[in-house]
Amino acid sequence: MAERIEVIIPVYRPGREFEKLILRLKKQTRLPDGIHVINTISDHFPARFCMEQGIRVTHIEKEQFDHGGTRDMGIRQSDADIIVFMTQDAVPYDKYLIENLIKPFERDDVGVTYARQLPGKDCHVIERYTRSFNYPEKSRLKGKEDLPVLGIKTFFCSDVCAAYSKKAYEETGGFEKKTIFNEDMILAGHMIEKGYKIAYAAEARVIHSHNYTGAQQFHRNFDLAVSQADHPEVFAGIASESEGIRLVKNTAKYLLREKKGWLIPELIWQSGCKYLGYRLGRSYRKLPFWLIKKCTMSQSYWEK
């Protein structure tokens, strides 16, 4: 019997990319058996479009949303064998996204697969290189044996577009019900510990990128580090700074090679913002609450 596939998309005030995403999902060579949109209530939601497309919609209040808890709610309401999570701004590159994303599940030991993220047309040069660094052209299967070589990259996974085996999800306890961020890597770490593999499916491609400012990079990395500090069972003893340094060095070489050395000061600024946010986030328990609120991009998380 063919496995059932459901796509779950948490949304908040979705824009044009969301409608493009849905329409391209409808043209896939492997059509999903269902699409479930979990909408955080706002003054902007394309209800008519969703109804016309036959999409199941669940509405939640803003204070109910949680990166892990909301996705866990969606997956536990599903009767599908494979759950594909996407974000509202991740647009399938072609009609083979679902087909290529689920291919790694031909192996019984794969718990989750994640797609390659390609930069959008408006993506800045530095972020464009970061995409290629984090999402290379070659697929890879990652397991516990890769920890000595890959370090924290072993757990790298992104719910921008990722498919989960329902069986593996339930066996490993699923997403954390309350998490500030990084729910995908936390679960990937638990899956690795249980003996499952993480598959990077480079042939499965979505268009997704952001042009973050230095301040936004600071806030994002603060929350990322908070999630790591809260889960020592996954991240303790696994340094990530070396991977960040490698990214900065490689990006600088790329800028020089492309005769765009004038962007190196911007690279240094953004990298400094990332590092400062990360260091503060790792030691957030030592910070006064007012400072935490200044550093985070997830105000509602601290108010719960």
Image: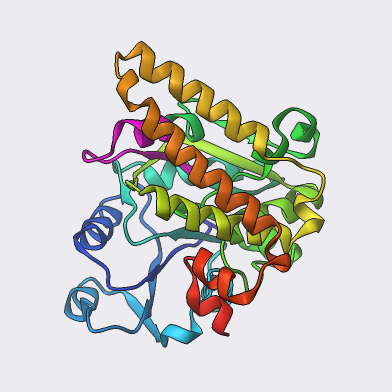
Q: Is residue 37 above or below residue 98?
A: below
Find residue 86 and report its horizontal and vertical position in percent: 42, 58
Quadrant (top left/top right/bottom left/bottom right) for the N terminus: bottom right
Magenta stretch: give its range: 115-131
**Residue 137 is covered by the magenta coloring:** no
Image coords of residue 91 (percent x, y): 30, 50
**Is 66 or 259 nearer to us in this picture?**
259
Res 75 seen here? no
* Image coords of residue 151 (percent x, y): 72, 36
Q: Is residue 58 visible?
A: yes
Which image quarter is the C terminus in? bottom right
Residue 265 vertical placement versus 190 (above, below): above
Check the image and report above or below for 81 versus 279.
below
Residue 208's place in the image compared with 174, above or below, is above
Look at the image and say whether residue 122 sits in the magenta stretch: yes
Task: Kindly identify the residue that appears in the image at 24 percent across and 75 percent down.
Answer: 50
Please tell me which residue lies in front, 86 or 150: 150
Q: Tell me the residue at 74%/38% (across/down).
A: 143
Please indicate whether residue 274 sits to the left or right of residue 12 in the image: right
Determine whether, in the image, residue 108 is placed left or right of residue 14.
Answer: right
